[in-house]
């Protein structure tokens, strides 16, 4: 059974074929392999108030969107041979990560995996008050010391959860908390490769929490 902060919502969009059609027609940019995800990202974001409200309903709290800091609604696609600097990683500086898969089911391969950090014995990243135990001032420093050096070393990670990709499936999870990564890249074009719409956002702190 998955933790309560890893959510799966099938049939997320009412008309997913229209969303996929949009994703296939728009312009994409590439980053020369310098980015932390494989492949290409759309130049523009596509979202709506209803999507924001849907996320708020799912996590039972208000969310904070800041497109200049982290993307909300951009499409990405990656083929079998696309490169990224990282594999297992954290999405720090945000609270939640949402991924809607738009690859047709007949082309889907692999999924999203959540990992245990063997060297540190951790199932999730330390919270701010625990970072001093690792001689780190912030999560970015923790990442540079304990995640990035091992990002592509399979022997450093044990699989905790595996969620297969599926057309029109949303996976919504605490991307800043869980060590996670893509399990498989596939396809040779945008039409048969891993095609997603990605959302990153923060959760509004509830009054009285942490006081």
Image (spheres, rainbow, N blue to C red):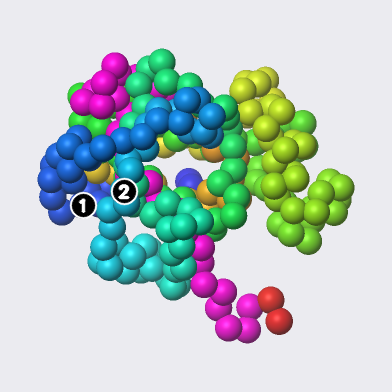
Q: Which mark is residue 44?
A: 2
- Left or right of 96 on screen, residue 39: left
- Which of the 4 image quarters holds residue 18? top left
Please determine whether, in this image, residue 182 is positioned above or below residue 175: above
Depth check, front residue: 112 or 37 = 37
Question: In front of the other: label 2 or label 1?
Answer: 2
Q: Which label was assigned to residue 13? A: 1
| Residue 104 numbered mark, or none | none
**Is residue 95 magenta-colored?**
no
Q: Residues within 10 Å of mark 2 (few under 14, many from 20)?
A: some
What's the residue at 71%, 57% (across, down)? 127
Q: Are marks 2 and 1 in contact (CB under 8 Å)?
A: no
Quarter of the view holding residue 14: bottom left
- Sequence order check, earlier mark of 2 and 1: 1
For the C terminus, the image quarter is bottom right
Measured from the top left, where is residue 123 in percent x and y?
66, 43
Q: Is residue 179 above or below residue 192?
A: below
Residue 139 to residue 111: above or below:
below
Indicate the secondary structure of the residue bearing disc 2: loop
Q: Main secondary structure of the magenta part?
A: loop
Residue 131 shows in the view? yes
Name which quarter of the figure residue 164 lies in.
top left
Measured as percent of width and height from the top left, residue 162 is found at: 47, 34
Q: Residue at 31% of width from left, 35% of height from top?
A: 28
Direction from residue 34 to residue 41 in the image, left or right: left
Q: Secondary structure at mark 1?
A: loop
* Vertical position of residue 120 compared to residue 206: above or below: above
- The structure residue drawn at horizontal position 21% and vertical position 26%, both measured from the top left corner, is 191
Q: What's drawn in magenta, residue-wise?
A: 183-209
Q: CA distance from mark 2 to mark 1?
A: 19 Å
Graded by Cα atoms within 10 Å as few (under 14), some (14 to 19) or many (20 or more), the crowding at tag 1 reads some
User: Does residue 20 appear in the picture of this structure?
Assistant: no
């Amino acid at each position: 059974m998955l933790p309560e902060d890893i959510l799966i919502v099938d049939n997320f969009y009412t008309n997913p074929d229209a969303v996929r059609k949009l994703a296939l027609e728009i312009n994409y940019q590439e980053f020369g392999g310098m980015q932390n995800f494989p492949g290409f990202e759309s130049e523009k974001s596509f979202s709506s108030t209803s999507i924001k409200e849907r996320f708020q309903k799912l996590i039972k709290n208000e969310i904070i969107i800041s497109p200049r800091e982290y993307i909300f609604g951009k499409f990405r696609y990656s083929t079998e041979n696309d490169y990224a600097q990282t594999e297992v990683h954290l999405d720090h500086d945000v609270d939640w990560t949402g991924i809607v898969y738009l690859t047709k089911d007949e082309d889907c391969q692999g999924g999203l995996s959540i990992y245990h950090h063997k060297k540190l014995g951790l199932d999730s990243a330390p919270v701010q008050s625990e970072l001093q135990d690792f001689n780190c001032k912030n999560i970015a420093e923790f990442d540079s010391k304990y995640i990035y050096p091992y990002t592509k070393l399979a022997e450093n990670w044990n699989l905790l959860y595996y969620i297969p990709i599926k057309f029109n499936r949303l996976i919504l999870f605490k991307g800043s908390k869980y060590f996670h990564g893509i399990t498989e890249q596939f396809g040779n074009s945008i039409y048969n490769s891993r095609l997603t719409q990605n959302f990153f956002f923060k959760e509004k702190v509830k009054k009285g929490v942490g006081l």
